[in-house]
Image (cartoon, helix red, strand yellow):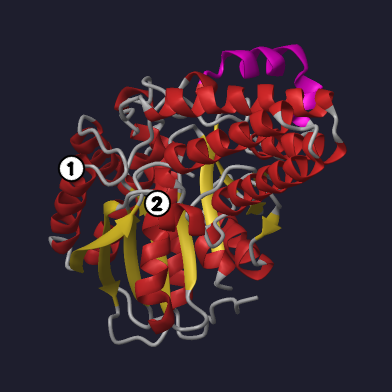
Amino acid sequence: MDRTRNDWRRKTADEVIRAYADIPRLPTSPGEHQVAEALAERLGGLGCDSAVERERATASYALPIGALCVAGLAAGVVSGRWGRRPAVRWVAGAAAAAVAAMIADDVAGGARWFRRAVIPHRRAHNVVASGGDRSAARTVVVLAHHDAAPSGVIFDQRVMRWIIRRFPRLIAAVHTNPPIWWPVILGPALIAAGALRDSRGLRRAGLVLTATNLAVLIDIARRPAVPGANDNLSGVAALVCVAESLHRTPITGLRVVFVSAGAEEALQEGIRAFARRHFATLDPDTCFINLESLGSGHLALLEGEGPVRMRDYAEPFRSFVAKCAQDIDVSLTRGLRSRNSTDSEVPRRHGFPVATIVSLDPNRLITHYHLESDIPDNVDLASVVAAAELAEHVIRELAQEHKQPPTRH
């Protein structure tokens, strides 16, 4: 891509990122609401029918997962202190196993009945704006999120960067990031195994691991929001650029719905609410383009994601987006998968074709991920602009009358 063009996109992206980065935007916070209102007004000024939708949501993943870790520790203590009685061991083991299953369910975006029943709920704020050809039967959803994450010691990248420098060939052969949620599930699972098998070693290992995970979650829960310039104001900025371009040069034959979700950093609470409210009204072949953390320098098209079990997105749409990138000379890495979760998992779970566009640095890391250093000056605007141009080209290709969107899987 010619980096000297798209000057207006670069200016718009920079302005959007700087406008919101200084506003603390934890999920369900007043700052999240403030940015949602400002973004809805901005999209309305670009000819979209925009609104802010208030949705019931939890404010953090740290609270429900932390509470479950406490329950797992309690089961471990009970099984250790009164474990001579087989009935006590079996009950404690079953409880710890249930805790492990509930953690897996929560982080994987399942039913989340524990979170829904036990954890206090507040209000997240989704921005939903309709543009393009509003009368068209076909729809594409451009997705981002405007809330920001808290930091934590666990997000320090220095150890990972040292490993990458020390073992570059090994890292180059890896195509997924580490499964960070597996140890959180493993802790109570070991407690359960120790109780059921009457193994002191397994039980103690589970207690140590679960206590460590709880300490990490407490550290995250007590932190304020990071600026979130890359994660994910870069995605919001690209979304605004697409809306502005479609306002400058309108399309026919395709409705474009711009969604900036709240509470993504509480593990996709905002997009889950959007699904409950809107998915039943969408055309079955609606496609989703998720713009996520675009300012790390080099764009990548994720093949799939899964905190617990890896699941790929629908291949026809991924290939279509990759072909669009070739058409406009946008470099797009393929073959990578994420053990983190994004808003893409919700439409994928409902069977919609999804393309998740992210960016990585030369070490295949998201720069300044969940760190206080995630500020506007550290965003690579060229990759943000490239993502916006790619998303727009995909939309214009789909809008052509002879094009048909890839079918759902």
Q: Please tell me which residue lies in front, 264 or 105.
A: 105
Identify the residue shown where x is 39% and y is 49%.
Answer: 119
Q: In whole angstroms, how far apart are the C-alphas of marks 1 and 2?
A: 28 Å
Q: Is residue 98 visible?
A: yes
Residue 50: % across, % down: 19, 66
Q: Please tell me which residue lies in front, 139 or 67.
A: 67
- Above or below: residue 278 compared with residue 233: below
Examine the structure image and report whether residue 157 is included in the region drawn in magenta. yes
Identify the residue shown where x is 56% and y is 48%.
Answer: 107
Residue 322: % across, % down: 61, 58
- Above or below: residue 326 compared with residue 192: below
Of badges 1 and 2, nearer the viewer stands 1
Mark 2 is surrounded, within 10 Å at the Cα level, by few (under 14), some (14 to 19) or many (20 or more) other residues, namely many
User: Would you name the residue on which mark 1 appears?
Assistant: 30
Q: Which quarter of the figure has residue 187?
A: top right
Residue 149 located left or right of residue 308: left
Identify the residue shown where x is 42% and y is 23%.
Answer: 371
Residue 214: % across, % down: 54, 28
Q: Which residues are the magenta region? A: 156-172
- Above or below: residue 82 compared with residue 291: above
Which amino acid, by three-letter code, is at mark 2?
Ala
Examine the structure image and report whether residue 148 is included in the region drawn in magenta. no
Which amino acid, by three-letter code, is at mark 1?
Pro
User: Would you name the residue on which mark 2 appears?
Assistant: 388
Q: Main secondary structure of the magenta part?
A: helix
* Residue placed furthest toward the front: 85
